[in-house]
Structures are given as C-alpha cells and as structure tokens.
Amino acid sequence: MAEPSPAETILLVEDEPEIRRFIVKVLAVQGYQVLEAHDGTQALALCRQHPGPIHLLLTDVVIPDTSGPELAANIQAFRPQIRFLYISAFDTGLLRQNFGLNARAAFLQKPFDAEDLLKKIHDVLQSQD
C-alpha cells in the first residue's frame, strides 16, 4: 500500500469515542493528520478554522445534529476539492432512504478493521471522480 503524504489531512466525524480513538490511532500511525469531531457543528468549526487543505471527510452517516451527507454538502460548499467516505453500522438501503446517502457514495460498513479502513481511504483519495 502506498504511503500517505504527510500533507494528507482527514476530518473524522464520529460520535462514538471508542471508534473515534481507534480510527485516529490507525490513521496517525500511517502518517495522516487527523482533525477529530464528535458532531456536525464541531466538524464545521474545525473545517472553517483549519488553514490548510482537508483531503477527506471521514464521517459516520448518523451523527448528532445532522447527517453525514448533509455535513458533506455544507463542507463541499467552501471546500469543493474534499473527498468523502461514509461509515455506518446501519444497512445501506436504510441509509439511502432515511439519511440521503447517495448510492454512488464511498461507504465502509461497520465493523471494519484497520486494513479495510486504510484500503478504502487510499482508494477514495486516489479516485478520479
């Protein structure tokens, strides 16, 4: 697997502290810079305050105060180059119906391991939409 560039920054939005810690640990070991948020409001604030690029929004679909797809749309309005990867333990059909998850959206089903997470992130960051 290709090494991430030290310049690659990921905004992680996950309300479950244990899952958030696991993801941060996995990403940090691989050299990613991780901005952590537990809800949409905190994520938007971090996104607005961060001076450099944010390459990927890694967000749970179901988060406090918004949904992952709504958050992605808000962030894309002022960071048009950002890529998205959604995670959830819920069925994708339910997520599409109730939370507006696009059928073509990059998605990783929970639970996942470090290898699956890193491969999916790599694929999303390398994709040529």
Image (cartoon, rainbow, N blue to C red):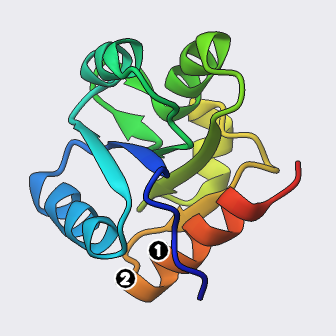
- Identify which residue is drawn at 55% across, 60% down: 91
- Identify which residue is drawn at 67% across, 42% down: 96
Disc 2 residue type (three-letter): Ala
Of the 4 image quadrants, the one containing the N terminus is bottom right
**Above/below status of 17 relative to 110:** above
**Above/below status of 111 relative to 88:** below
The answer to whether residue 125 is left or right of residue 90 is right
**What is the distance, in whole Å, between disc 2 and disc 1 at their CAs?**
5 Å
Residue 23's spot in the image, x, y percent?
28, 65
Disc 1 residue type (three-letter): Leu
Residue 101's spot in the image, x, y percent?
66, 39
**How many residues crowd mark 1 within 10 Å: few (<14), some (14–19), many (20+)?**
many
Say which residue label 2 marks.
114
Residue 124's spot in the image, x, y percent?
68, 60
Dividing the picture into quarters, in which one does residue 24 lie? bottom left
Say which residue label 1 marks.
117
Is any atom of residue 113 visible in this view? no
The answer to whether residue 36 is left or right of residue 97 is left
**Above/below status of 107 relative to 3:** above
**How many residues crowd mark 2 within 10 Å: few (<14), some (14–19), many (20+)?**
few
Is 19 in front, or is 46?
Answer: 46
Cβ–Cβ under 8 Å for marks 2 and 1: yes
* Label 2 SS: helix
Dividing the picture into quarters, in which one does residue 32 lie? bottom left
Furthest-right residue in view?
129
Q: Which mark is residue 77?
A: none
- Identify which residue is drawn at 58% across, 33% down: 98
* Label 1 SS: helix
Is any atom of residue 36 visible in this view? yes
Residue 123's spot in the image, x, y percent?
69, 69
- Identify which residue is drawn at 33% across, 34% down: 63
